[in-house]
Image (spheres, rainbow, N blue to C red):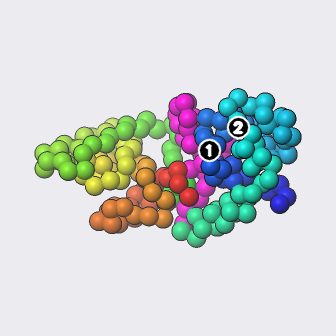
């Protein structure tokens, strides 16, 4: 298969190679500076990247997952989501600073305000009534002071954190443990839809 014109397809094809983690994938990008150039590299050049195994280098040279990546992008777009890569301007700036940032994110909703301060707020899936109210009040107060809230859109504290932020007029980010097309728990369907309208939902998973 020829080298893709869409850099998202190249990123996703690499991202889906079993055994190729985010750390080594970032090293590949930092060495070649262009994701498409990774597919044009020789086996010798690929093996110059620290931590890259021979079997994974051969997978890259075979370009085996480019077609599947193209299909995954189409599937994401049909659900109203988009693919956000490490090199995109809209990729969260602070996320780039962690040891192993995800090289590809699936996003559904508004653009992330990159200059905004975000606070992570997570907790029990089986909290007390007091815990739910406290999470909501804290998030609402943060939102009213200009901060956004990041949580996992799970049952319990996470859901209360998102709701509080939205009620305070803030921007909230939900980080899913499933594909972007899966609402879990199902009881969060209304909250999920509201976050897509007023915030954003993210996933590392196709």
Residue to which mark 2 is pinned? 53
Rendered residue at 43%/53% (across/down): 176
Confirm whether the magenta stretch covers residue 107.
no
Can see residue 93? no
Q: How crowded is mark 1: few (under 14 residues within 10 Å), some or many (20 or more)?
A: few
Q: In which quarter of the image is residue 141?
A: top left
Q: Residue tagged by mark 1?
A: 19
Check the image and name the residue furthest to the bottom. Answer: 78
Give SS at disc 2.
loop
> Which image quadrant is residue 89 in?
top right
Secondary structure mainly formed by the magenta segment: loop
129 relative to 141, above or below:
below
Q: Which residue is drawn at 74% across and 31% down?
A: 49
Query: Residue 197, how many percent across, how many down?
Result: 44, 61
Residue 168, percent from left and from top: 30, 48
Image vertical order of residue 75 relative to residue 139, above or below: below
Real-space Cα separation, disc 1 to disc 2, in angstroms: 9 Å
Q: Where are the magenta residues, as a range?
A: 80-105
Could you say whether the residue bearing mark 1 is in a helix, strand or loop? loop
Please determine whether, in this image, residue 187 is positioned above or below residue 136.
below
* Image position, residue 105 (x, y; %): 56, 50
Asked if one can make out residue 195 in the rendered structure from this viewpoint, the answer is yes
Relative to 115, does residue 106 appear above or below in the rendering?
A: below
Which residue is pictured at 55% across the width and 62% down the height? 81
């Amino acid at each position: 298969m020829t080298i893709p014109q869409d850099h998202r397809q190249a990123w996703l094809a690499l991202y889906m190679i079993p055994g190729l983690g985010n750390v080594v994938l970032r090293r590949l990008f930092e060495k070649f500076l262009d994701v498409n150039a990774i597919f044009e590299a020789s086996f010798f050049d690929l093996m110059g990247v620290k931590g890259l195994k021979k079997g994974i280098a051969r997978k890259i040279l075979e370009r085996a997952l480019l077609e599947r990546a193209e299909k995954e992008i189409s599937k994401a777009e049909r659900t109203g989501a988009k693919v956000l890569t490490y090199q995109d301007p809209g990729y969260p700036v602070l996320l780039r600073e962690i040891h192993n940032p995800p090289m590809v994110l699936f996003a559904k909703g508004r653009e992330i305000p990159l200059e905004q301060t975000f606070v992570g707020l997570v907790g029990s899936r089986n909290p007390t009534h007091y815990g739910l109210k406290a999470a909501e009040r804290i998030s609402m107060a943060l939102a009213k002071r200009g901060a956004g809230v990041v949580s996992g859109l799970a049952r319990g504290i996470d859901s209360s954190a998102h709701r509080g932020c939205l009620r305070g007029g803030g921007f909230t980010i939900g980080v899913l443990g499933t594909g972007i097309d899966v609402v879990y728990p199902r009881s969060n369907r209304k909250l999920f839809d509201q976050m897509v309208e007023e915030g954003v939902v993210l996933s590392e998973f196709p």
